[in-house]
């Protein structure tokens, strides 16, 4: 992979107050707000990327395991009850809807795609960024992963299905070569990701209080912010599998 | 202007598909050539007869109850692509698997959701169905059926998803990340998309008529298609993939940029990667959905790119409908059939070309002379302003 990580940001529901009042977010979903908030925090660290010519050719990868599930449920529920389908709900119901919102907000014109792969969604996003950055015309890639809780899915015995945690995390990555050429500050280098399936004897690991399917990027950011200089980060999944992210911390 | 360096070609060595007009690439080709539309009442459903056949043909992959339809279709298409390709007829650890879909296995849980909300079924029953909601469950299902543990990815960028999957698969092969890459898409008709597109007033109850002055909307359809990509041609290469381009409009959640600027960038990028000039493209297989906005925007992009060297431009969605996340795969397979038959397909349903659309429409299927049909440019434009283009070339 050899990705140079140049900025990062995270967001949770508690961060969304300033966004809810903005006209731009009037029709936005929770996922869209979370993703935008994490993106804003990341971009605040790299002012040289804001409003410059790079954004038109930068790439964007958006990952979400459950996608815009809440909006999908609202659409189907309303359709079932009234026979009416609401255009805005449909427009916001696809996994890709969040991506569309972000590209409009960023005025991003480069390659953009949405991926979804359950517990390894975050990891897949990072690897996909490395693939997209093979194109020398792409100066950097914004990688955002988001999932949110859908309260309508609280069952009669009070446990919630779907995502049991929520949040968004963004990293801005480029190649080592591009970072050196443009003298962008590097937080760390991502070297590779190993995937390990659950063994028959593996016990289910604890999720953590706010674990969500696509939280690999948030956990990576937490690791970098912790000051711990370990060059591997093991991400244990609730199904007993795990991934190992190999890093090189920048001096 | 050509650059000095052309990216190395990626070979297509096998394909498999199921659509509303049949369960093989040749069946799709026959339908297109004989102007037989698989659209009924505005939708392109995979027939019960087709489902029965593909269930039987994939029974070696599962035991007990067959996979649900949303998983069965890509299982069959992938199995056919494996059998048709060079190399082992099963997925190996050094293979790659990239699949595209918009709604995954939604039909497993959408009705269960409504029944649960109406208190017709208990939460535990709904929860069981809901396990298939994450799109990754589709990839997990395929991985289980094919005993696959190699590199995999699921792309869900709406109508451009499968084209993006093909572009990424080419990258993986070129990078040496995988030996073969099986790329494709799958989509199942469901209430979400049917009622959703209907409320956006984008559906037509008649077979779509792309680029026609009287076009009234799209036909949603379902199906699945897979291609095997490889760095080497093998014994029976079907086509070469020379280039790809991806871009965003950054304009609107559902409507394309009215001047098609994003699609223009994607097409240019694909040509640049393929080291081809616009004049070397024989045929643009357009996204051409039959919607007012898409056809207008896409045609502006094509006009701007090709100018005086306008190739033939057509859409085949009148035959097979718009299979959303699977469309890029199904239509690329049709393009490959066309290359091997040296035939440029007309736009079915096009009777009175829109005078505001300045494209070169083949009003009948055209048999190309030797050397005339070498390179096809395949376009897709998707919700969220996601555009992707491929250059598909004769083997």
Image (cartoon, coloured by chain):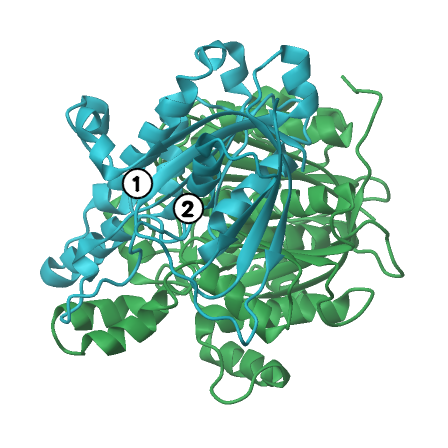
The residue depicted at 67 percent of the width and 29 percent of the height is A135
Characterize the local packing of mark 2: few (<14), some (14-19) or many (20 or more) Cα atoms within 10 angstroms: many
Q: Is residue A65 above or below residue B305?
A: below
Q: Residue A201 location, x and y as percent?
A: 53, 76
Q: Is residue A203 above or below residue A234?
A: below
Characterize the local packing of mark 1: few (<14), some (14-19) or many (20 or more) Cα atoms within 10 angstroms: many
B256 left or right, relative to B4: left
Q: Which residue is mark 2?
A: A215
Which residue is more in the foreground, A171 or B173? A171
Which chain: green? B
The residue depicted at 18 percent of the width and 62 percent of the height is A154
Q: For the residue labelled by badge 1, is the local secondary structure a helix, a strand or a loop?
A: helix
On the question of residue B161 being in view, the answer is yes
Chain to which the residue tagged by mark 2 belongs:
A
Which residue is more in the foreground, A46 or B381? A46
Q: For the residue labelled by badge 2, is the local secondary structure a helix, a strand or a loop?
A: loop
Q: Residue B16 location, x and y as percent?
A: 65, 65
Q: Residue B129 location, x and y as percent?
A: 32, 73
Q: Which residue is mark 1?
A: A31
Chain to which the residue tagged by mark 1 belongs:
A
Chain A colour is cyan
């Amino acid at each position: 992979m050899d990705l140079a990580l140049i900025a990062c940001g995270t967001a949770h529901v508690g961060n969304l107050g300033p966004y809810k009042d903005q006209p731009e977010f009037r029709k936005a979903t929770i996922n869209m707000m979370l993703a935008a908030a994490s993106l804003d925090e990341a971009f605040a660290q790299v002012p040289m990327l804001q409003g410059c010519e790079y954004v038109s050719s930068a790439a964007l990868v958006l990952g979400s395991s459950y996608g815009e599930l809440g909006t999908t449920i609202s659409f189907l529920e309303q359709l079932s009850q009234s026979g009416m389908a609401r255009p805005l709900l449909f427009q916001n119901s696809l996994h890709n809807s969040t991506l569309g919102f972000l590209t409009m907000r960023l005025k991003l014109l480069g390659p953009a795609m949405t991926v979804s792969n359950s517990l390894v969604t975050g990891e897949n996003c990072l690897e996909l960024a490395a693939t997209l950055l093979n194109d020398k015309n792409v100066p950097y890639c914004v990688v955002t992963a988001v999932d949110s809780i859908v309260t309508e899915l609280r069952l009669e015995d009070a446990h919630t299905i779907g995502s049991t945690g929520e949040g968004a995390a963004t990293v801005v990555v480029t190649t080592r070569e591009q970072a050196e050429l443009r003298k962008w500050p590097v937080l760390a280098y991502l070297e590779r990701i190993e995937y390990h399936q659950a063994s028959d004897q593996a016990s289910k690991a604890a999720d953590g209080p706010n674990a969500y399917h696509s939280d690999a990027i948030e956990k990576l950011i937490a690791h970098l912010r912790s000051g711990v200089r370990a060059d591997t980060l093991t991400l244990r999944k609730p199904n007993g599998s795990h991934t190992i992210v190999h890093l090189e911390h920048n001096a | 202007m050509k650059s000095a360096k052309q990216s190395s070609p990626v070979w297509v060595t096998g394909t498999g598909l199921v659509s509303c007009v049949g369960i093989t690439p040749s069946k799709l080709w026959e339908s297109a050539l004989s102007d037989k539309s698989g659209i009924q009442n505005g939708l392109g459903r995979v027939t019960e007869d087709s489902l029965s056949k593909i269930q039987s043909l994939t029974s070696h992959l599962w035991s007990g109850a067959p996979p649900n339809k949303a998983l069965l279709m890509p299982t069959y298409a992938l199995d056919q692509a494996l059998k048709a390709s060079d190399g082992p007829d099963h997925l190996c650890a050094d293979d790659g698997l990239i699949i595209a879909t918009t709604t995954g296995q939604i039909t497993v849980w959408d009705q269960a959701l409504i029944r649960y909300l109406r208190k017709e079924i208990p939460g535990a029953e709904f929860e069981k169905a809901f396990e298939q909601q994450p799109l990754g469950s589709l990839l997990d299902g395929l991985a289980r059926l094919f005993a696959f543990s190699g590199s995999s990815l699921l792309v869900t960028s709406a109508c451009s998803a499968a084209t993006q999957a093909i572009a990424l698969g080419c990258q993986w092969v070129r990078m040496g990340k995988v030996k073969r890459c099986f790329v494709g898409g799958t989509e199942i008709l469901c209430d979400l998309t049917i009622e959703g597109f209907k409320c956006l007033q984008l559906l037509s109850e008649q077979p779509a008529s792309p680029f026609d002055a009287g076009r009234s909307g799209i036909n949603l359809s379902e199906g699945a298609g897979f291609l095997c990509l490889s760095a080497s041609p093998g014994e029976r290469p079907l086509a070469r993939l020379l280039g790809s381009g991806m871009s965003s409009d950054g304009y609107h959640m559902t409507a394309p940029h009215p001047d098609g600027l994003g699609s223009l960038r994607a097409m240019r990028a694909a040509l640049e990667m393929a080291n081809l000039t616009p004049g070397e493209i024989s045929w643009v297989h357009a996204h051409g959905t039959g919607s007012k906005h898409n056809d207008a925007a896409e045609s502006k992009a094509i006009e701007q790119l090709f100018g005086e060297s306008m190739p033939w431009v057509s859409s085949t969605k009148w035959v097979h409908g718009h299979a959303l996340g699977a469309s890029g795969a199904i239509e690329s397979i049709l393009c490959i059939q066309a290359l091997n038959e040296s035939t440029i397909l007309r736009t079915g349903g096009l009777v009175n070309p829109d005078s505001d659309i300045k494209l070169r429409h083949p009003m009948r299927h055209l048999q190309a002379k030797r050397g005339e049909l070498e390179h096809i440019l395949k376009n897709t434009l998707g919700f969220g302003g996601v555009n992707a283009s491929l250059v598909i070339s004769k083997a």
